[in-house]
Amino acid sequence: MAAGCSGDVAVLMQRNSPFGFATAGRIRFGRGVAGEAATAARGYGRQVLLLRGGSVAWVDELARDLAAAGCEVTQLRSSGEPSVEDVRAAVAAGRGAQVVLGVGGGAVIDLAKAAAALIPSDCDVMEHLEVVGAGLPLQADPLPMIAIPTTAGTGAEVTKNAVIAVPDAARKVSLRDDRMLPRLALVDPALTDGAPRGVTLGSGLDALVQVIEPYLSSKANPLSDALCRAAIPQGIAALKRLAAGEVPAARDAMAYVSLSGGLALANAGLGAVHGLAGVIGGQFGAPHGLICGRLLGPVLAANADVLGVSARFTEVQRWLSDGFDLPEDGTFKALTAMLDDWGLDRLNRWIPEDADLTETAREAAASSSMRANPCVLEAKTLEACIRAAM
């Protein structure tokens, strides 16, 4: 009896080890919540910097609502992942702003977070970037920032970093600070309705990876586990339905999975998929979501080979097998054939056959995302994962 009690106490102590959980100041989720943006922004001031992508016409309505609320709006359009020069341009455009709105995919929201962080500062973005910059802490508190995602993938609306491309270094690295968490995240699945199939599947694969990697992470905690356990099967089901066609309920589910992934990764980290993706994206320009989707199977298989029998990997394998109708034996490798059947490009569209992937793998091994991978993967194993995705 005593031994049993001791074991129970040990389990309880393990589950209640100290951990933290940080997220946006407030989250609003559901169809129609985007309509709250103008009123919310006006609460922070009249001078508004509105950063937007180019694909959602609703942003024109938002700009009119902001003007009707008495705001002076500076708009800046963004396309593609933000570069150092894009950040500098956004900071210059936003001088005098009191609040920043980011409406678009993860790249636009990252640009908005970076602008909000640096507008109050006299420092250049390179002074704060990880790895290739000085990595200095922010000089001042960021401006209030409202994030409104129009894709279901990155979860950037609830993370504390902005991924920035540095062309001179052929890398994508983060500007990161706890204070960069948005004041308000408005997650409205209606804004994702009708997105092109390629965008939907690429962003959806990113969302799925971002609930799988934190669940397998060495930094997982009880709150991130709860989010991921619920979201992984939901994300698989939603992605499968969206691969077949437009389904509003699946859009709602995918938006929730994306939000869950952002919450989880911000507090439990990621893993080798994202460690590789940041370097591959910076060197070869392949789309981030597609990189993650193509690497998921090879990386899961590589981790499983190193770890051996693992309860969590068995759970993930079962969810993937059941949800995507994949064979129980070799599920992780079968993901590659499934993405082929969906008509998604392999990475050899961007990565030349003679590319120096040994160096790519070495750089990825040193990335911040790799620190939370559940085991150490050697550079040669990481290189094999890239080749399996080509």
Image (cartoon, rainbow, N blue to C red):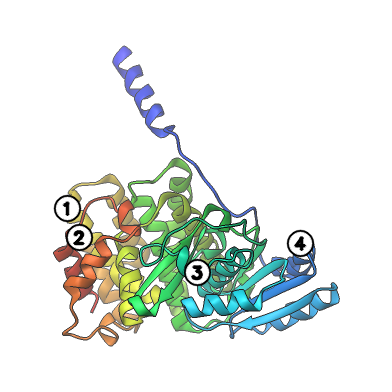
Look at 72% across and 71% down and name the residue there: 96
- From mark 3 to mark 1, how far is it between C-alphas? 39 Å
Answer whether labels 3 and 1 touch (C-beta < 8 Å).
no
Amino acid at pointer 3: Val
Q: Say which residue appears at 48% left-offset and 67% top-offset.
A: 154
Q: Which residue is mark 1?
A: 306
Between 42 and 265, the one nearer to me in the picture: 42
Q: Give residue 302's mark.
A: 2
Please indicate, yes or no, whether residue 377 appears anywhere in the rendered image: yes
Residue at point 28%, 87% (across, down): 349
Residue 125 bears which disc, if any? 3
Q: Secondary structure at mark 1?
A: helix
> Residue at left 66%, top 62%?
143
Disc 2 and disc 4 in contact, CB within 8 angstroms: no
All told, the count of numbered labels is 4
Residue 296 got which mark?
Answer: none
What amino acid is labelled 2 in the image?
A: Ala
Within-10-Å neighbours for mark 3: few <14, some 14–19, many 20+:
many
Work out how far the residue at label 1 is from the one at label 2, CA to CA, in angstroms. 7 Å
- State the SS at label 4: loop
